[in-house]
Amino acid sequence: MSDPTIEPIVIRRAESPADYIACQDAQRRSWGLVDESYVVPVATLVGANLHGGLVLGAFLEDGTAAGLSFAFLGKIDGMLGLYSQLTGVVPEYQGRGLGRRMKQAQFMIAEAEGLACVAWAFDPLQAGNARFNLETLQATASHYVVDMYGPRTDDLNAGTPTDRLIAVWEPGQPTRPALPDRPFEALPSLIDPDGPAARPIEGQGMPPLALLEIPGDLAALRASAPERANRWRLAARGAFEDAFGKGYRAVGTVRAGDGEERRQAYVLHRPPGEGAG
């Protein structure tokens, strides 16, 4: 068996039937899929890859794939860009930066082809994904989709609404606003964590910066208190929809504490003159 700690991995476009099949297998293993209806057909991968989209594999020397990233050409906020349907890394190769490398390859190819942006969806309550998308990849988000995919049976989504934030990466995004030293104390919060419940933003004076808190560890909360996890989702849904409707955009995340005391929140920014009445 190959050693995943030392085996070379090359990230490149899928080029052959064997490459596409390897990417399909990487999708199954990355998400623990047992329902074949979730697996992207080879014909769809090929068609997208040859006509403006992008199928990347993290290929090993034996031709198998340790991860994949699949995107197709689309319009995001009226701009022509890549919509990245999925990016995943198989479990034994996680923690090596492959997800970041595949997303960065997407960005480079999109920019080289003159596309305005790359967009993708993610679960807003997954704290690790939030940090990765908004901090590591420097994306932002201003669209919330309720139950985007409907009921799912895969390991990550079974039994919960598939609400999603749409992350958008654009070349040359403006400098992000500076934050105070102790943001959880200094900035208004759009969620009361004791409920949890959304706090209407009008009652807080429409500040330029606000925090939208989420659970520090969603998986642990779902295992120990599923009803409370669902209340968090509904509170976040209401707070995001309210804030986005008034011109705010999620531009980063902040953290505080460790273990059971760990807290995480999105940083929402409203530029001057933005928003609805």
Image (cartoon, grey):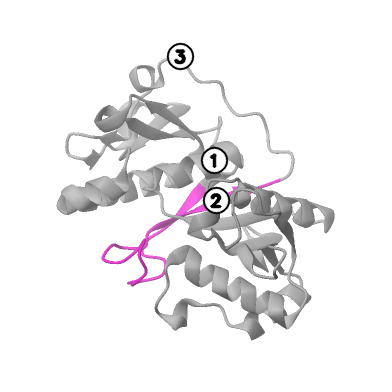
Q: Earlier in the sequence, mark 1 or mark 3?
A: 1
Task: Please tell me how many numbered marks the rendered image carries.
Answer: 3
In this view, the residue farthest toward the top is 181
Residue at the (70%, 70%) spot, across then down: 63
Q: Label 3 crowding class (10 Å Cα cut-off): few <14, some 14-19, many 20+?
A: few
Label 3 sits on residue: 181
The span picked out in magenta is: 142-170
Do tag 1 and tag 2 residues touch (Cβ < 8 Å)?
yes
User: What residue is at 68 percent from the left and 62 percent from the top?
Assistant: 82
Q: Nearer the viewer, residue 122 or 30?
A: 30
Give the CA distance from mark 1 to mark 2: 8 Å
> Residue 150, how many percent across, how many down?
36, 71
Residue 153 painted magenta: yes
Kind of residue sitting beneath label 2: Ala
Give the residue type that dot 3 points to.
Asp
Residue beneath disc 2: 167
Could you say where residue 91 lies in the image, as x and y percent from the top left? 48, 57
- State the residue position of label 1: 134
Q: Residue at x 65, y 64 (%)?
A: 75
Secondary structure of the residue carrying tag 3 is loop
Residue 14 image point, x, y percent: 73, 71
